[in-house]
Image (cartoon, rainbow, N blue to C red):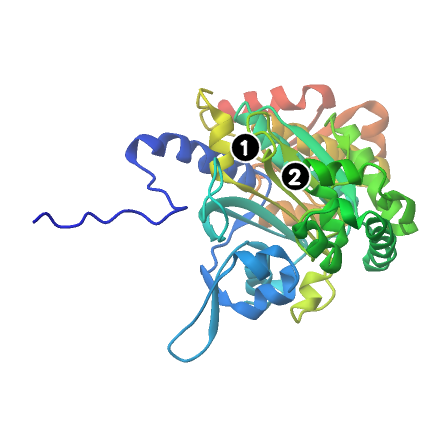
Amino acid sequence: MAKKIFRRLRGTQDILPKDQANWSLVNDTFAKLCVDAGYKRIITPIIEDTNLFVRSVGSDSEIVSKEMYTFEDKSGNSLTLRPEGTAPIVRAYLENGLSSHPKPVKLYIVNEPMFRYNRPQAGRYRQFFQIGVEVFGSDNAQTDAQVIALAVRFYQRLNIKFELQINTIGDKYTRKKFKSALTKYFSEVRDKLDETAKMQLSTNPMRLLDSKDKKVIKVCEKAPQILDYLDRDSRNHFEAVLEYLDQLGIEYDLNPKLVRGLDYYNKTVFEFWGSHQGMQNSLGGGGRYDGLVEELGGKPTPAVGFSAGIERILIEIGKTGQRPAVTSPYVFVASLGDEAKKEAFALTEKLLDSGIAALSETNKKNIADQLSKAAKVKADYCLILGKKEILNQTIIVKDMVSGNQETVPIGKIVTTLATRYKSK
């Protein structure tokens, strides 16, 4: 009698040798872009205290109520296989003293397994893998734009076509007023909602806005919009984010119905939609979660992040060729004055687009402090922008090894750096 051959569990996958090239392409591409932009890698356990997710994600969310793999260990502790990566990283940030590090603290993950019990389908598994970034300690709209720009750069490197959807959901007081308006609106059309939608109406009516059900989508067409309930700070922050995206030439669609699925989000939220997945077309997304660090026991700390599922990205890659990693100098962009800071922001993103590792520090006002930071991160070059340089459209290039410096036209800085580095 033949022995039974065991088979993998439903919703899991074997990543075979033939699949490894594309998996490596995704992870290696993302990791290099993160390192170039000054992020440090973090790895957290796949099991956590269940209450970590109940408090962060929300007890009424579908993840907590329906999708988590939760069990008791032999000591009676309630443990959960992590369904998402942000809450564990916040826990690690607080527990390991990263909150005392100079801000912003920039962290990234690659090829990290997550677990959710849901119906398996194309690009969606019960064990799936994510890449992502988290930035702690900056409430600047520029940081939102930098995180989005990193994601854009990643998809572009993989030749993936995408649409950037973006919205703001304001602060907790904004959302309270908005939820009341939504509850009133949907209660009047309750007979047009299915049982799932009715349940969401009683727990979090905002979730109805990004429903994939065609009937609910139709009902949502005349629903209130959050932009009409925004507080002034959230509105100003969002307008600044859009200005920075415009400065970088990043195209986006304003989507007032985009809310994201987790309770910890506030202000900026965004998603990247692909072209080959129908209704399940989200390639990744993120946003601000300024209250989560405090909710999990830390001091009030602004934060913003992005994550994406590798399986859905692989669907989009198709037959795109691999782009080899570029050996490049590490460049620190220092600036003095508001106009110079704006120029430094755009220049840093341009360098990263060109495959040159670059970092800027706009929180430090003193040039000496910025040069000190450039030395600490072991930058090959420091680029210096001030009022004079902005006026003359030039930039100072300081070789951090020899100490030599020269002034070059700002429009030629990318080719100059590439040439000088190759000659070393």
Pick the front one: 173 or 87: 173
Badge 1: how crowded within 10 Å, few (<14), some, or many (20+)? some
Q: Position of residue 368 (x, y in %)?
A: 73, 48
- Please name the residue shown 66% across and 62% down the image: 60
Confirm whether residue 39 shows in the render: yes
On the image, numbered disc 2 is attached to which residue? 212
Specify the label residue 342 is tagged with.
Answer: none
Q: Are marks 1 and 2 in contact (CB under 8 Å)?
A: no
Q: Which mark is residue 329?
A: 1
The answer to whether 307 is drawn above or below residue 357 in the figure is: below
Of the two numbered discs 1 and 2 on the same chain, state the one appearing first in sequence.
2
Q: Position of residue 221 (x, y in %)?
A: 81, 36
The residue that appears at 74% across and 35% down in the rendered structure is 344
- Name the amino acid, label 1: Pro
Image point (74%, 65%), residue name:
300
Q: Nearer the viewer, residue 330 or 72?
A: 72
> Which of label 1 and label 2 is nearer to you?
2
Q: Residue furthest bottom?
A: 75
The image shows residue 388, relative to residue 167, as above or below, that is: above
Amino acid at pointer 2: Lys
Q: Could you say which is closer to the camera, residue 166 or residue 242?
A: 166
Q: Position of residue 209 (x, y in %)?
A: 75, 44
Percent across and percent down for residue 197 are 70, 50
Q: Quadrant of residue 398?
A: top right
Q: Is residue 13 left or right of residue 45?
A: left
Label 1, label 2: how many angstroms apart (C-alpha)?
Answer: 45 Å
In this rendering, the answer to whether 208 lies above or below 70 is above
- Kindly state the secondary structure of the residue where label 1 is placed: loop
Whether residue 327 appears in this view of the structure is no
